Image (cartoon, rainbow, N blue to C red):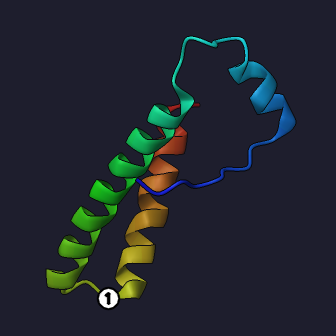
């Protein structure tokens, strides 16, 4: 296995120290795996999508406004 160094803000590190029973390396590995799965799904979706960047941005803005309104 390859080692990787991860920098976190001091405040976050202090909070993590409140839970010494947690294997933070395992938490980071799992988060990275989940992100990679999501990115691969996104890549597959966009590969076959016929939507233009402009259309995607427009749809994203519309969704953002609706969600903001819903959760106010």
Please state the horizontal and vertical placement of residue 47, each as a whole percent of the image. Answer: 20, 83
Residue drawn where x is 74% and y is 43% of the image = 8
Residue 35 horizontal side relative to residue 61, left or right: left
Residue 54 horizontal side relative to residue 48, left or right: right
The answer to whether 31 is drawn above or below residue 51 in the figure is: above
Determine which residue is flagged by label 1: 52
Please state the horizontal and vertical placement of residue 19, each as a whole percent of the image. Answer: 63, 12
Residue drawn where x is 42% and y is 86% of the image = 54
Q: In which quadrant will I find the C terminus?
A: top right
Looking at the picture, tell me which residue is in the foreground, 39 or 51: 39
The answer to whether 26 is drawn above or below residue 37 in the figure is: above
Looking at the picture, tell me which residue is in the foreground, 19 or 34: 19
Residue drawn where x is 49% and y is 54% of the image = 64
Which residue is farthest left?
Answer: 48
Please state the horizontal and vertical placement of residue 36, each as a whole percent of the image. Answer: 34, 59
Q: Splitting the image into 4 quarters, where does residue 48 fall? A: bottom left
């Amino acid at each position: 296995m390859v080692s990787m160094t991860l920098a976190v803000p001091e405040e976050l590190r202090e909070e993590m120290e409140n839970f010494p029973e947690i294997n933070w390396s395992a938490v980071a590995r799992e988060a990275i795996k989940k992100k990679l799965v999501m990115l691969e799904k996104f890549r597959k979706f966009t590969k076959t999508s016929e939507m233009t960047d402009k259309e995607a941005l427009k749809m994203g803005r519309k969704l953002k406004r609706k969600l903001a309104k819903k959760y106010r």
